Amino acid sequence: MAGVTVSDNRRAYDAIMREVRRMGRATVTIGIHGDAGQHREAEGMTVAQIGAVHEFGTAEIPARSFLRATVDGDATIAEYAEDQVREVATGKTDATKAANRIGLVAVGAVKRRIQTRIPPPLSEATRAKRAAKASHGGGLAGMGGAQTPLIDSGQLIQSIQYRAEV
């Protein structure tokens, strides 16, 4: 019989199983976290509150879901998360790296969605207000921000982060 070697590497198996359990307990949050600070232009409101207003809408401001619609509607995020879990289960990466990678991919997807001009378009009043601000050197008019919903000063989009707890 040809020489077949079977080995039992219990330490490697135990290490992989520890990482799989850690991955099972991991949480990754994506959004504007409470410590993002005060909004520069909306007196008395935090960036997280401004994000919630835009995500869910109010009587005066239409909802423009940038978080829920991205996470629910972009299958590549879930597929990438599954790939990362598989990488942990096969010992190719650890839970911390996998969770951080998932967070980075999700944040990138949310920011790309915002840049696609989430409907509805800006009202004429908002367009006029932004045009006036841009004429005085404010806002992001030169970068398409003047006509893009959710992008004016850039503070909201820059505040979208992830947190991975493993």
Image (spheres, grey):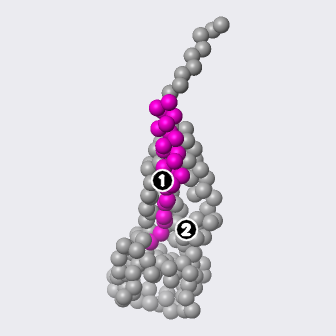
Image x and y of residue 155, in percent = 39, 75
Residue 150 lies left or right of residue 159; in this view the side is right
Image x and y of residue 61, in percent = 54, 88
Q: Is residue 14 above or below residue 76?
A: above
Specify the amino acid type for callout 2: Arg
Q: Quadrant of residue 41?
A: bottom left
Residue 22 is covered by the magenta coloring = yes
User: Circle 1 sits on which residue?
Assistant: 99
Specify the amino acid type for callout 1: Ala
Q: How many marks?
A: 2
Q: Is residue 166 above or below residue 90?
A: below
If you read the primary sequence from the N terminus, does the residue marked by circle 2 or circle 1 appear first? 1
The residue stretch that appears in magenta: 10-32
Image x and y of residue 76, in percent = 60, 56
Disc 1 is placed on an element classified as: helix
Residue at left offset 39%, top offset 85%? 45
User: Circle 2 sits on which residue?
Assistant: 113
Helix, strand or loop: magenta stretch: helix
